[in-house]
Amino acid sequence: MPGFNIQAQGCGGGGGGNSRANPNTEVARNHRYLLETIGPLTPFACYAKKCSRPSMEVDKIIMHHGQDEISMAGKQRWNPIEITFYEVVQGISVVAQALHQWAGKQTIDINSSSVGSQSAYKKDCMLAMLDGQGSPIWMYKMLGCWPSKISPCELSYTDTELAEVTVTLEINKAIEVGG
């Protein structure tokens, strides 16, 4: 691992705290990822600039037992992820248009006064981290994803940066699988 001098027990075979890590070890890199499917946004996955990884929180349950408090694991909660896309223009911003169409499926249809079904707007998504050869190291299968927030970038005559749109995806559950 060029540039690293990791002193860790069990690395390199010497035992103790003074052994060195194998210099040929490769670590995961932030820029090697693939959004395989993003619900209705799959055709635009190649325009993703950055993406956060799914993270989970577990509620803590406190049980009282005499003078002791015993903590136990409670319900799991998956935090939303954010994906930032470049706004690709083909007449109109196709990424932003697809995001708004997806989000529109969860709202009430004024003409029919019915709410969109969950199967119409909740979609499964897949995020993978890749190694140097493009093979998956690990994958997250994210179930029941839907856009809760769509944030286009601010416009300015003095800014020459590429236009972006960020979507916040709510997740019902994520399953991590090895590559």
Image (cartoon, rainbow, N blue to C red):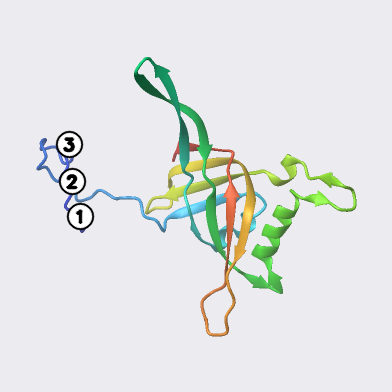
Q: Give me the residue at 46% from left, 34% from top.
A: 58
Cα–Cα span, label 2 and label 3: 9 Å
Q: For residue 151, what is the image quadrant?
A: bottom right
Q: Which amino acid is tagged 3?
A: Gly
Taking 172 as reference, is 5 left or right? left
Identify the residue under disc 3.
10
Q: Residue 138: percent from the left, percent from the top?
A: 43, 42
The answer to whether the residues at label 2 and label 3 have Cβ atoms under 8 Å apart is no
Q: Which amino acid is tagged 2?
A: Ala
Q: Give me the residue at 17% from left, 36% from top.
A: 10
Assign a secondary structure to mark 3. loop
Cα–Cα span, label 1 and label 2: 8 Å
Assign a secondary structure to mark 2. loop
Q: Which mark is residue 19?
A: none
Q: Residue 165: percent from the left, percent from the top?
A: 59, 65
Identify the residue under disc 2.
21
Q: Residue 147: percent from the left, percent from the top?
A: 64, 51
3 or 1: tag closer to the N-terminus: 1
